[in-house]
Image (cartoon, grey):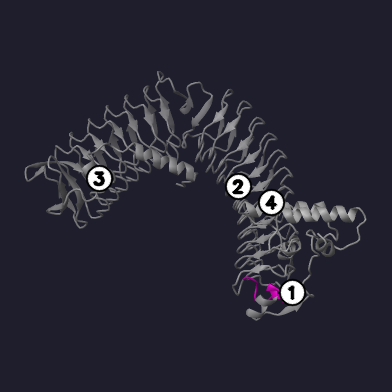
Amino acid sequence: MKKTKFVSVLTACAMLSGMAVMLPMVPDTAIVAGAYENETYGQLTYINAGDYIAITDCDETATEVEIPAEIDGVKVTMLAKAAFKDCSNLITVTIPDGVKTIWIDAFYGCEALTTITIPDSVTSIGNSAFSGCSGLTSINIPDGVTSIENFAFDGCSSLTSITIPDGVTSIGDYAFDDCSSLTSITIPDDVTSIGDSAFSGCSSLTSITIPESVTSIGDDAFTFCSSLTSITVSEDNESYKDIDGVLFSKDAATILVYPADKVEDAYVIPDGVTNIGDDAFSSCSSLTTITIPDTVTSIGKGVFSDCDALTTITIPDRVTSIGAGVFYDCDALTAITIPDGVTSIGDDAFNSCSSLTTITIPDTVTSIGESAFYCCVSLITITIPDSVMSIGCGAFSDCYALTSITIPDGVTNIEGFTFSHCNALTSITIPESVTSIEDDAFSHCDALISITIPDSVTSIGEGAFYSCDALTTITIPDSVTSIGYSAFGDCADLTTITILNSECEIYDYSDTIAFNATIRGYANSTAQAYAEKYGRKFEVIGESPTLPLGNINGDESIDATDAALLLSAAAAAGAGGESGLTAEQIKAADLDGNGSFDASDASLILMYAAYSGAGGELGVTEFLAQL
């Protein structure tokens, strides 16, 4: 079973926040370090709080443990946080009547634990209490327990059956996640909520019934249930319904879960459905075609991920975004047309669609997310429309068959790993809107013969062109102020690299520029210093050029455009960013000679421009001397 989950940092934080809210209430003394002295009883460690005893630890070599009902006449009522955590040799545990609380992580990671008896006195089982107990085959939950907390039985991969008592009202996030041997479970009539990923990865579960009482089913509650053939919902449930074993919202406007092992090769989503919920068809390996009605306007994240047999699908015109991981790992998908209304292609949208050869992106799309086409190994060509303003990190990484691509004029950064390992890419045009080429952007593009870096680029990141074996020559424009670690390292055929900025910061490492390359640059430049330090051949192309004072843009005139460039650079620097000016431009911008550039220098430029425009014949230096 393949598991592919798309969880953002924000989602993870929200999940952790939820865990904190759902902690069972216990006496403060149990969680305040040092509140009581630890004492021992056989292989157990405990604290005596006066009116109750809490077991706090156990010898990790213990294999069988019988917890006493009382110690020195005081009743044992709690198994404290992580009391038996990672006791990997523990096989059996007997818990006495009188224990009320099994707290957070109490038996977390007890891999050898096969049997445990929980007495009826227990009313609270904390988060992750039995998480990772992979040898546990069965367990009884006492009638007094009212909620199954987050991760309570997560990873209990040998658990074949469990009875949830009637008093339980909620099943927490990941409560039975990866209980891969669980074949059946009955959700009692008092349950009102089923948390995120509650039964995710229960790969032996074949059917499930949702009672009338359930009003909330979390995201991914039944994802990766690879044997699930049907979901049945009580007819009296006011929030959900099933249609032929498929889970829908009560109004049938949202399709929520199509059972992964429902034996059909084609499915038609009913007319009237407007939304396809997150991961709704995830891992449905039998489906070859899915028909989406024109009424659909929203497709959630991961909707068709891991649909290995899906060959064709048409996205209706009313859909405006392709969400994260929607077609992740759809191995059989060969072609797809994105409708004109779509404005964004989400992270991982077509990640690992290994048979995808062509795709049409409309000119309404403005952004392509991270790893959107990662490892689309059959994709030969793709046209990115001019409307695209951003291309995410790794968007086309490992597209081995991609031979050419055009980056639109609106893109300002080539993000990290965007075209890394595009082994067939021979040439690429970088538009003049691009200001930075980030880390590993073109690393391991083995067939890349030539590339032109425009004057707009100011920085080249770490490993940006690392191991581009076919690259023979490259010119770095004078706009580039920094070249990162190993940016041109291990470029086997690189014969010459010309660096036009005499003060370009070159990362101090022997393989920042390939050993075999001749470095060309100005006399007394940083390029010459680098070449001399690492014993490289260096060719002088002339004395370092200097810009006339005030002529910041180098166009041989001093006018309002120079003042505008200066003000823009000063604003950027003042906001804590990079000015974007070269060292030579910075010198040319310092008209008042105070060692910096600011609005007063721009004012002097405008004064001189007005003077010369009126026929004044003095040079800028002479003009400034008269002020």
Is 134 situated left or right of 306 in this image?
left
- Front residue (pair 192, 598): 598
For disc 4, the neighbor class at 10 Å (few under 14, some 14 to 19, many from 20) is many
For disc 2, the neighbor class at 10 Å (few under 14, some 14 to 19, many from 20) is many
Residue reaching furthest to the right: 615
* Cα–Cα span, label 4 and label 2: 18 Å
CB within 8 Å, label 2 to label 1:
no
- Front residue (pair 207, 340): 340
Image height check: is 221 above or below 419? above
Residue 69 % position (x, y): 11, 42
First to last magenta residue range: 512-527
- The residue tagged 3 is 31
Image height check: is 6 above or below 259? below
- The residue tagged 1 is 520
- The residue tagged 4 is 412
* Residue 60 within the magenta-colored segment of the rendering: no
Dominant secondary structure of the residues highlighted in magenta in the image: loop
Query: Element at badge 1?
Result: strand
Badge 2 amino acid: Ala
* Cα–Cα span, label 3 and label 2: 45 Å
Badge 4 amino acid: Thr
Q: Residue 454: name its quadrant.
A: bottom right
Is 109 situated left or right of 343 in this image?
left
CB within 8 Å, label 1 to label 4:
no
Residue reaching furthest to the front: 626
First of labels 3, 4 by sequence position: 3
* Cα–Cα span, label 1 and label 3: 67 Å
First of labels 3, 2 by sequence position: 3
Is 475 situated left or right of 350 in this image?
right
Badge 1 amino acid: Arg
